[in-house]
Image: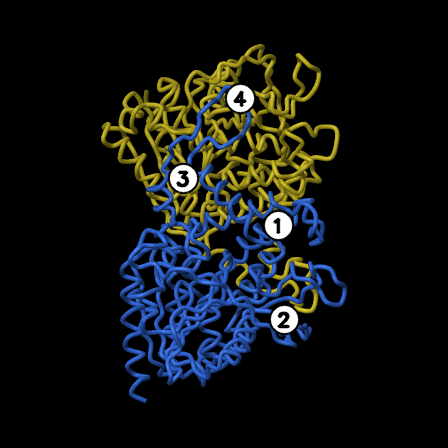
Chain colours: A blue, B yellow
Amino acid sequence: MESAPSISGEKSFGLVKTNYFTFERFAFRSGRILGPVTLAYETYGTLNNKKNNAILIAHALSGSAHAAGFHTEHDQYPGWWDLYIGPGKPFDTERYFIISSNVIGGCSGSTGPSSINPETGKPFGLDFPMVTIQDMVNAQLQLLQHLGIEKLLSIAGGSMGGMQAVKWAIAYPGMVNSVIAIATSASLSAQGIALNEVGRQAIMNDPNWNNGNYYGSKGPDAGLSLARMIGHITYLSETHMHEKFGRRFQEEDLSTSSFKNAFMVESYLHYQGDKFVDRFDANSYLYISKAIDYFDLKKDYGNLHDAFADVSANFLVISFTSDWLYPSAQSKEIVQALRANGKNVMYTDIETDMGHDTFLIDYEPLKKNISNFLKREFERISKE
Amino acid sequence: MESAPSISGEKSFGLVKTNYFTFERFAFRSGRILGPVTLAYETYGTLNNKKNNAILIAHALSGSAHAAGFHTEHDQYPGWWDLYIGPGKPFDTERYFIISSNVIGGCSGSTGPSSINPETGKPFGLDFPMVTIQDMVNAQLQLLQHLGIEKLLSIAGGSMGGMQAVKWAIAYPGMVNSVIAIATSASLSAQGIALNEVGRQAIMNDPNWNNGNYYGSKGPDAGLSLARMIGHITYLSETHMHEKFGRRFQEEDLSTSSFKNAFMVESYLHYQGDKFVDRFDANSYLYISKAIDYFDLKKDYGNLHDAFADVSANFLVISFTSDWLYPSAQSKEIVQALRANGKNVMYTDIETDMGHDTFLIDYEPLKKNISNFLKREFERISKE
């Protein structure tokens, strides 16, 4: 699934660095208050004088602030949405000012369960407050105020990033000109919750998890790797998995009962799981996946129609026909509720075999939709 | 999903007991030879004088020989296919002689990894030979010979049971009058292999698994429970899960980070997982799930068309529209290959929201299909 554009490539964004913004006090939806709290963020492009070209990028479960470019010349891979962010790309850095931050509760520079609790001098672990999508949005609000941005041209994200984008438009309607919500949902299905739960259970079953107290010793690597393997199955479609791996063998041997990887698809999943352990914190996986489970616009606002009553942003909603984790029907539900409120919505159900992860790959129909929508929105705003 | 007909109910099969057949020597497809080997089996109904009314029932991954009736008057649940086996039921015990055995490699009375290795006096563990669907069929052949049955009226099964049924017709065409293959496949998809692998990994990640040497001490209960939870997600459809659980809460509490079950669907899965641990052996789960992965008629016979060249049985093939683990397309592939060989096939893609596990529930369209097919087949055979 991964592409690796070279840092010297024509369309590369080049070298970037992660910034850190610390604020004194943050009130979680749970009622807990922490401080100081830090958000890791990156920016690409330049904020114009009118300050009307800012776009916030919200990442999914396993993402980070590093959405584009390279941190060093030796990096093997660029940021997670580098295919979409850069000069001439849909999030065109010659035109827009892009902001990408790591969610609160995360593990890539923002305050989360692996951060030091100032009250104890030790990592929070499970003492970290429960995190919700609303908390992620509220923390991003602090960052935008720090950057002097009063209104976003757009807020864009896929999967959990789409949940944040939609929540932004509802919680702070005056600050959001438009929303790009990709492969997302107003609330996860029972099946989605179930799949998140088996991932969490894989982590919590690992004795090295130790009820969340593993910092400074060997962590629950096997459990986290397994959680990622389960996740990866859900990010791909059956068709794509079949095309990519079929039933090809890595090794076939009936004479021993080692239960090692026999099939290519098993080997691929183990590789993905093992790679993930190097960059992700198991407790963050628990917190963030639970935030996804708890997200429920229908419950929070009585019903989906009422949730969107005060929204003023224009919406681009995109789903993928082969996405079984966030099926198209869930996007359509959002679209219908917005339209019933008389809101302006563009909706496309993109025909693809690539499943949920389509938003992370080099996919022209997706690029074109985002690019056209942003151009039109920027023109509209520029006339105001 | 479970129904619990009373032992005194009108259609109950009543009390049954498990029998054990031991044979001296069994050659596995891997080349390994074991002996003695035992198969646990049950029978329901009476073999007629012509010995032409015998039906073999083949179970799925987690099944056992106990397919119908109750073992004691205090049993809470009857055998796993009690809804389908009994007087007046599709597998009508007033008309047919039903045989159901636990697969070789299993853990419900048949020889498997938890059995004592006569060479060492200790349980086999991973010293047990790798098991294939062909091995299961070959062991069942020994049992039929012991019971004096030269030809089966039918062999029926769902999921892995369907694989055995199809394999029977190919391997021993002269012994099989008809096949009832439900929700099955000529080879599991890459996605199916991936899902089996994360289940196995859940077991092998459990430190109590101890490379398969856990007999006599605490076994990998948490791992086996998690494997079962993963399995259960795949046995239900998204729609059915939604109808059954939706996003209903067991407990909602943002104030603590316990990561206990918040949603009903999580609680249900944990219940299923915990219940499974009481009746199933983790090593058997590894062996049997791997047998499913390795099953591949296309590979074994060059292609699916050639696999069915010598089959003489009539087929009833049934798939379920909401089954995403063994999707309808995989059944259609079997049907097409059989028809291209000029074989007699009835095929029904049953409209249902209940997913893969539809074959285990009280589902009239399925009952009617099986019942009618068997009646016609029995009439045909009786005229010979």
| Cα separation between marks 1 and 2 | 28 Å
Residue closest to the eye, B273 or A37? A37
Q: Secondary structure at mark 3?
A: helix
The chain that hosts pointer 2 is: A
Name the residue type under label 4.
Thr
* Label ID, residue A256: 4
Q: Tell me which label, 1 or 2, sits earlier in the chain.
A: 2
- Tell me which chain the residue with mark 1 is part of: A
Alpha carbon separation for disc pair 3 and 2: 44 Å
Position of residue B216 in the picture relative to residue A47 (left or right): right
Q: Earlier in the sequence, mark 4 or mark 1?
A: 1
Q: Secondary structure at mark 2?
A: strand
Q: Indicate the position of residue B292 as horizontal and vertical percent values.
A: 46, 32
Q: Hey, what amino acid is under mark 1? A: Gln
Q: Quadrant of residue A347?
A: bottom left
**Labelled pair 3, 2 in contact (Cβ < 8 Å):** no
The numbered dot on residue A327 is none
Q: Residues within 10 Å of mark 4 (few under 14, many from 20)?
A: some
Q: Which mark is residue A37?
A: 2
Q: CA distance from mark 4 to mark 1?
A: 30 Å
Q: Residue at x 44, y 72 (%)?
A: A56
Q: Residue at x 48, y 25 (%)?
A: B132
* Residue under label 1: A201
Identity, as a three-letter code, of the amino acid under mark 3:
Ala
Is B374 positioned to the left or the right of B74 in the image? left
* Badge 3: chain ID: B
Q: Is residue A181 above or below residue A381?
A: above
Quadrant in the rendering for residue A264: top left
Q: CA distance from mark 3 to mark 4?
A: 22 Å
Q: Are marks 3 and 1 in contact (CB under 8 Å)?
A: no
Q: Kindly identify the amino acid type of the residue bearing the numbered disc 2.
A: Val
- Of residues B62 and B83, the one nearer the viewer is B62
